[in-house]
Amino acid sequence: MLNLHKAEFLRSAVGTADFPQDGKPQIVFAGKSNVGKSSVINRLLNRRSFARVSAQPGKTIHINYFCIDDTIYLVDLPGYGYARVSKAERERWGRLMDTYFAQQLMTLGIQIVDIRHAPTADDRIMSHWFLQSGVPFAVIANKLDKIRKSEREPNLLRIRESLLLPETCPVIPFSAEKGDGREEVLALLYAAAGDASAEEDAAAVGDSASADASKGPCPLDSRRL
C-alpha cells in the first residue's frame, strides 16, 4: 500500500529539463486558480500545509512536483482562468503545459472544478485536452460542503454534461474542508501507482475515461488559460 505519510516536495519545473523521466507514475492535477487545488492535495495526504495554499489566485506559475513514497509523483499544474494575470503570463503558462503534455509523461489526469458553479470555457478546454490525451481521467467536484444536499446530483449532472464527459469518466463529489470523497480519489491514485489491492476500489468508482490516443492532444488555447 502506498505510504501517503512519506511525501516530499521535489521541484518546481519551468521546462522539459525539469520534468522527471524516471518512469514513476505521474498523477496530474489541474484546475482554475481559485478552485482549491492545493487544499485538495493537502486533504488527500492529510497534511494541513503540504501543498502551499496561496491567498493570491494565479500565483502558482510553475509545475510543482511532489514525490509520494518514492513511488509516484503528484504533479500540480499552474492554475488557469485568473483574469488579473497578464496576457504574457497566460501565454507562458500555456506553453509550459503544452510542453509537459507533449512529453506524454502523465499516468492519470485529475481536473478539479467547483461543484457550486457551471464549468467555465477554460474548464471545458482543459477537460477536452485531458480526454484527447488518451490517459485515464477523472473530475473532482470540490467544495461539496458549500452546497445543499438537494443540489448535489443536479450539479454533478451539469458538470458531466457541460464537460462532455463519457459515462466512464468518474465525477467525484469532494470536500477539501471535510474530507468527503477522499477515499474514492485515493482508490484511483492507488490503482495508478500499480497497487493491485486497489483495483477493485478504483473500478467501483468508475472506469477511467480514455480517448483515441492516435488523435493526439488538442492544442491548448493559452490565450484563454
Image (spheres, grey):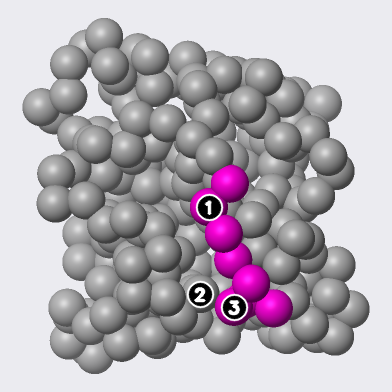
CA–CA distance between discs 2 and 1? Answer: 13 Å
Above or below for 159 versus 96: below
Between 7 and 120, the residue placed more toward the observer is 7
Q: Bounds of the magenta span?
A: 3-10
Q: Viewer-nearest of labels 2 and 3?
A: 3
Q: Mark 1: which secondary structure?
A: strand
**What distance separates the C-alpha of mark 2 from that of mark 3?**
7 Å
Question: Dot 3: what SS?
Answer: loop
Left or right: 139 as drawn, with respect to 72:
left
| Label 2–label 3 contact, CB within 8 A | no
Contact, mark 2 vs mark 1 (Cβ under 8 Å): no
Quick one: quadrant of the C terminus?
top left
Amino acid residing under circle 3: His
For residue 80, above or below residue 150: above
Q: Where is mark 3, residue-wise?
A: 5
Q: Mark 1 — residue?
A: 9
Q: Where is residue 108 in the image (x, y as percent from the top left)?
A: 68, 53
Instruction: Using a 10 Å C-alpha cutoff, classify the residue at mark 1 as few (fewer than 14 neighbours), some (14 to 19) or many (20 or more).
Output: some
| x and y, in percent, of residue 101 in the image | 63, 28
Locate residue 158: give its quadrant: bottom left
Whole-percent x, y for residue 96 in the image: 49, 20
Q: Which mark is residue 45?
A: 2
Which badge, 2 or 1, comes first in the chain's sequence? 1
With respect to residue 199, does 217 lie above or below?
above
Residue at the location (71% across, 67% down)? 69
Residue 117 can be seen in this image: yes
Q: Do the residues labelled 3 and 1 touch (CB within 8 Å)?
A: no
Instruction: Mark 2 vs mark 1: give the one in front.
Output: 1
Residue type at mark 2 is: Leu
Left or right side of 187 for 165: left
**Measuring 28% from the left and 16% from the top, which residue is drawn there?**
89
Tally of numbered tags: 3
